[in-house]
Image (cartoon, grey):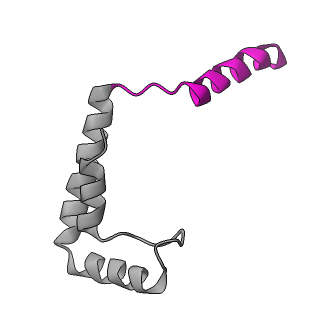
Amino acid sequence: RSADLPTIVALLAECLREPRFSADAFHAARMRMIAELRALSADPAALAMQGLTRLLYPPSHLRHEPAPADAIALLENVA
């Protein structure tokens, strides 16, 4: 309903300005991503595709993928 629009916009603005992530949920998501990267590190096809992507796209390009070890290191340093 259009009468609810100001409330919806206010809630959306609050979510964008002040996102809330529980520490437990953030930690779980980070650990899940690290586990997925470790699993990909054992997959020859995934490693080949990532290597090709790194050759085709420089680090400044949107499609560039860091090496799995580099991505894991970044995630481990996120607080």
Q: Is residue 72 left or right of residue 3?
A: left
Q: Quadrant of the C terminus?
A: top left
Q: Is residue 70 left or right of residue 56?
A: left
Please count the marks in the image. Answer: 0
Most frequent secondary structure within the magenta stretch: helix
Which residue appears at 27% of the width and 28% of the height? 24
Taking depth in this image into account, of 2 and 26 the one nearest to the observer is 26
The residue sitting at the right extreme is 2
Residue 44: quarter of image:
bottom left
Image coords of residue 56 (percent x, y): 47, 85
Which residue appears at 52% of the width and 71% of the height? 60
Taking depth in this image into account, of 74 and 20 the one nearest to the observer is 74
Q: Eyeballing the image, is 7 above or below 23?
A: above
Image coords of residue 46 (percent x, y): 29, 76
Q: Quadrant of the N terminus?
A: top right
Q: Is residue 12 magenta?
A: yes
Q: Is residue 13 left or right of residue 18?
A: right
Q: Eyeballing the image, is 72 above or below 8?
A: below
The residue sitting at the left extreme is 42
Q: Which residues are magenta?
A: 1-22
Image coords of residue 37 (percent x, y): 25, 61
Q: Is residue 5 magenta?
A: yes
Q: Eyeballing the image, is 41 above or below 11?
A: below
Residue 22: quarter of image:
top left
Which residue appears at 24% of the width and 49% of the height? 76
Image coords of residue 26 (percent x, y): 32, 35
Residue 18: quarter of image:
top right
Q: Eyeballing the image, is 62 above or below 1?
A: below
